[in-house]
Amino acid sequence: MEVPMKSTLFGIALAALSSVAMAADLPVRTEAPAPAPVFVAANNWTGFYVGIVGGYSWSSVTHCDGGSNPACGGGGSVFPSYNHNGASFGGTLGYNHQIGSTVLGLEGDLSWANWRGSSGSNGAFGCGGGNTDRCASAIDWFATVRARLGYSMGNTLPYLTAGLAIDRLGASIVARSFTRTDRAHFVVGGGIEHAFTRNWSAKIEYLHIFSNGDFQYDTTQECGNPGCFLRSKDISMVRVGLNYRFGGSAAPVVAKY
């Protein structure tokens, strides 16, 4: 009985050794390596830019004579009024500086304008002496210098803006022989700009130019003392623009998996 027992124990030991040897020959399982991170440059708005801008504006004006109504009001008179609208096109120069997600900027632009309007005479005001004479007004050009405050959302930049606007206004009652003046105004607005490549971005914005009072345009006192006046309301403007940004995306850098 002892021999068979020893043989059995020997067989079990031999089988165990064989299993260990076979296991040593099997390939070792390893985890798949993690993918290498891909580094993508986040858009940075810091730098100078130049661009073109164009849009459309709308407002209204009223003509009146001096006499008893030097500021186009009072007396119950209804003076000639009309819409004063038109297009504009020009160039832009600016600089942005980004701190975290905040973007501070300074922008200036100069635009040719074709803002026009006219009206015939009425019972309270005569627009010249001939059948073709009309009360008329025109703005030939304007410029703005504005600060911008934006919040960077990567390639998209919503912003607020405020500053100074200057325009050249002309008014007439005699065959559109304009008397002109340069005016300064306060301007506010806002917009959104989107960078669609490293250097190119497009924007759409709204500007509101506040009126700065009445314009006495009749130096010959054809309207009587103290002369003819033009009262203009605030100007609203919607513009689109295309900018080329020098430098473009520089830093920071983020990892994308």
Image (tube, grey):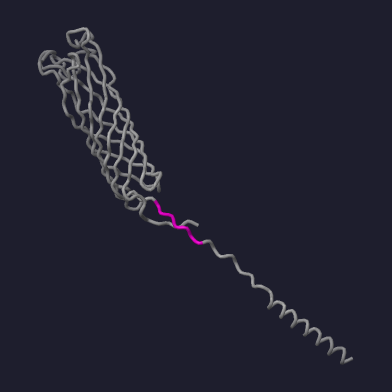
Farthest right residue? 1
Residue at 25%, 14% in the rendered image: 119
Q: Residue 19's image quarter?
A: bottom right
Q: Is residue 98 above or below residue 76?
A: below
**What range of the chain is rendered magenta?**
36-42
Instruction: Out of 224 and 76, give the one closest to the viewer.
Output: 224
Instruction: Out of 49 and 16, give the one closest to the viewer.
Output: 49
Q: Locate residue 55, reporting x and y percent.
A: 32, 30
Q: Is residue 104 above or below residue 218?
A: below
Q: Locate residue 103, reporting x and y percent.
A: 32, 48
Q: Locate residue 123, reporting x and y percent.
A: 22, 8
Q: Locate residue 67, reporting x and y percent.
A: 13, 14
Residue at 23%, 18% in the rendered image: 62
Instruction: Out of 140 and 12, give the one closest to the viewer.
Output: 140
Verify whether residue 63 appears in magenta: no
Name the quadrant of the N terminus.
bottom right
Answer left or right for 11 relative to 107.
right
Verify whether residue 39 appears in magenta: yes
Q: Residue 58's image quarter?
A: top left
